[in-house]
Image (spheres, coloured by chain):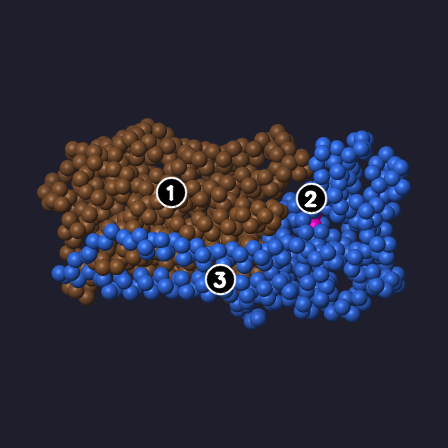
Chain colours: A brown, B blue
Amino acid sequence: MASTAIPVNQAPTPKLNYLNNGHSLKSWLLTTDHKRIALLYLISVSAFFFLGGFFAMLIRLELLTPEGDLLQADTYNKVFTMHGIVMVFFFLIPVVPAILGNFLVPLMIGAKDLAFPRINLLSWYLYVGAGILFLHCMLNGGVDTGWTFYTPYSTSSNTNVVEAGLAIFIAGFSSIFTGLNFIVTIHRMRAPGLTWDRLPLFIWSNYATSVVMILGTPVIAITMVLVVAERLLHLGIFDPALGGDPVLFQHLFWFYSHPAVYIMILPSMGVISELVACFSRKRVFGYKFVAMSSVAIAVFGFLVWAHHLFVAGISLYAAMVFSFLSFVVGVPSAVKVFNWTATLYKGSVSFATPMLYAFGFIGLFTIGGLTGLILATIGIDVHVTDTYFVVAHFHYVMVGGVLMGYLGGLHFWWPKISGRMYPEGWAKLSALFVFVGFNLTFFPQFILGYVGMPRRYWQYPPEFQVLNVLSTAGASVLAVGYLLPMIYLLWSLRYGPIAEANPWGAAGLEWQTSSPPPTFNFDETPVVTWEAYNYEDIPAPKELEAPVAR
Amino acid sequence: MSKYLPLWPDQASTMAGQVDALYIYLLLVSGIMTALIFIGVAVLAIKYRRVPGREAHPIEGSLILEIGWTVIPFFVMLTFFVWGAVLFFEERTPPVNATEVYVVAKQWMWKIEHMEGQREINELHVPTGENVKLIMTSQDVIHSFFIPAFRIKQDVLPGRYTTLWFKATKPGTYHLFCAEYCGTNHSGMGGDIVVMEPQDYAQWMAGGPALPLQDTGRALFAQLGCATCHRSDAQGRGPSLVGVYNNQVQLEDGRTVTADENYVRESILDPSAKIVNGFKPVMPAFQGIVSDEQLNALVAYVKSLSEPPTGTAGLQDQPAPSPAQPQKAQVQ
């Protein structure tokens, strides 16, 4: 279709875009431009990522030896708690929706901005406020309950549980507002002709994510308030000593925190659909099934929370029901993996960095998903729950999945975000580091878990040392893989080659506007007359051809 | 099992082999699935790599494939579910003839009390070939009793009993871990499960003066004044407790409950929670008055009232404890 051809009139003259439209600090801190807010998130979320990563390194260094030698027991407990809280609430949950989603949702649907630009800015301030509160909590001694805050330990712990709980409460509202904004925007602000079945799959997955955000997040907010109320007012809610029920806390906590896994992974799955389509130059195989599988994951994701409680004292039959439902939610995830694989068939596959991350995602998510099925099998879960098997499993899904999707997406849309290309050689090298480092870190933990090493152990029996050393070695490689992109992406802001509007020859409205886009995204509102991923109408860029063919 | 690089845990209970068999099945299926996807991605990506002059073929999808890869994985998963559920049912259903052992967890130790009155800390001695049922509670936060070599685990909660059972098969010393994070010394809250041949176990059990748990309970029952109302001739102000345990109890509000360990426990600590039909809520609450250990003894005594007069389940044939030998481990 001729209307989607790349605009080639990208003159080197500096056009007014969202980046150079105002340079003052105020123009950034009071912006309502979704793209600038996305960059504010990029900076703050990255800061939390490196903080969480620093805690991860402390954990891995402590576990290098069986004795507790580097840190005190209490310090270690605080470190893994803060690693979990920072990574879950301040990195994994916002990373893809608040950075890539914020930047791309309006662009992909041909809108000028999100439906509520000021609420969008408020979301960021809530996030930052929650982050500062948590940093304050950390510097005042931190919290040692584990990110799961299980009662009655969190009722009795003498660390800063109240402040950490409030930080999570506030961060939750940031996420609720983002979800609300996305839902309204996707319903009301699609460009003419952009019907639901023409939407990019990234939009579908962010839509499903938003539904989970606004339905699930209030529950964690309430739960945190109840914990705070129990601590401050001695209301007996969860602590049996006050007449409460500790298992009730676990039900409430996981009613949010299991769907939260889908808040993390669904947007990344959306990224992978975009990447696989672009670098195979084909429409995603089974588009409707991939779109609907996002919705199915969001719905069934709400019905599986008690699979975290199989040994917590729930009834035999409740355990069986939740085991069954956990298998059901596995089906739509499997459907996505099969469809991405099938998309390659008869495609024209190139191996640019974003596609390498997509391959990495498929590999790691497959392992993460299948080990999830092992955990859903109740007879096995009794043995492996609360061991390193679980730690390995959720890192495969949350780090292997979410982070691969995020890094793939960040590289893919970097030319659009920054107007510059990243250095391909360095990017490929760091993708390799991430993949190898990740597997070396977390694969030994599956074995460690099955032989019986419990999680959250500061010291451990000596026979577990070799596997722990492997894991720590892997973590070092992984750290290099994460530091490299930060360096070369910053470098590219100044020295990277200027990016064209559509350097990948990609479908999608975001590629039809200039790189970086103007403040209001499109000079004129696009009218969509084609299906998503109409790659047959778009010429492939020359430089992406396979090396053998050159 | 290699000392430095253990790849597989010891198998020391009847459950271990069964869990491993299912795990191997899951690993096989998962391995095949992973291989299919990895090989599929690799083969397709290389075969259809970008070369000049070759365009991608637009393909919409295939309903048959979509149905196939929705339904087939679902049925494969159903086999996981059914096998796992059957195994779980067995894990969670203690045999009726099991020897009972009471476990009290606290930050950061495991206190064990055998029916014969033997007490241990962070150590549990059990014989091979015998069903053992642990009746566990916590004095503070949630803990979890985990024996990797037996492939079993159960959270231990404050304010109620949870149970766990096993049948050890191989003599040896195995790890006991606390698997639910419980504070500062969580990783130190472990110990040894010592599995012994029955004759060695009998000898160990004989080693020390000990009053059977139900006898401690009987003494407490008299001392706390329970016996004045709960008279065995059913003429007291409270219901007779003879034959109550493990039977149905008709409550005043019309409900019927089974008098299990948790029911007996609750009826001591908070008697007004469930009033037996035909009685008045006149019993004082014993919350905060009896310790978890005393409660265990009372529960053991109430249970013994429902058993044939020969004695407790399990080890009644063991020789009487000899006072001459030293106590293995003394609580507190």
Question: Identity of the amino acid at label 1?
Answer: Val
User: In the rendering, which numbered label is found on residue B26?
Assistant: 3
Report the quarter where the N terminus of chain A lies: top left
The residue drawn where x is 55% and y is 65% is B21
Q: Which residue is mark 2?
A: B160
Vertical side of B28 occupied by A70: above or below: above
Is B137 covered by the magenta stretch?
A: yes
Badge 1 sits on which subunit? Answer: A
Which residue occupies the foreground of this view, B34 or A293? Answer: A293
In x, y percent, where is residue A529?
17, 39
Magenta-colored span: B136-140
Of callouts 3 and 2, the N-terminal one: 3
Identify the residue at image location x=83%, y=38%.
B239
On screen, residue B148 versus residue A362, left or right, reads right
Question: Which amino acid type corresponds to the residue marked 3 in the rendered image?
Answer: Leu
Q: From this viewpoint, which residue is outermost toward the bottom?
A: B2
| Left or right, residue A235 beside residue A432 | right
Residue kind at label 2, given as amino acid type: Arg
Q: CA distance from mark 3 to mark 2?
A: 34 Å
Q: Position of residue A271 (x, y in %)?
A: 31, 47
Residue B56 occupies quadrant: bottom left
Which quarter of the figure is the C terminus of chain A placed in? bottom left
The residue carrying mark 1 is A295
Give the alpha-carbon distance from disc 1 to disc 3, as whole Å: 28 Å
Q: Chain of mark 2?
A: B
Q: Residues within 10 Å of mark 2 (few under 14, many from 20)?
A: some
Give yes or no for contact between labels 3 and 2 (Cβ–Cβ under 8 Å): no
Query: Most prominent secondary structure in the magenta stretch?
Result: strand
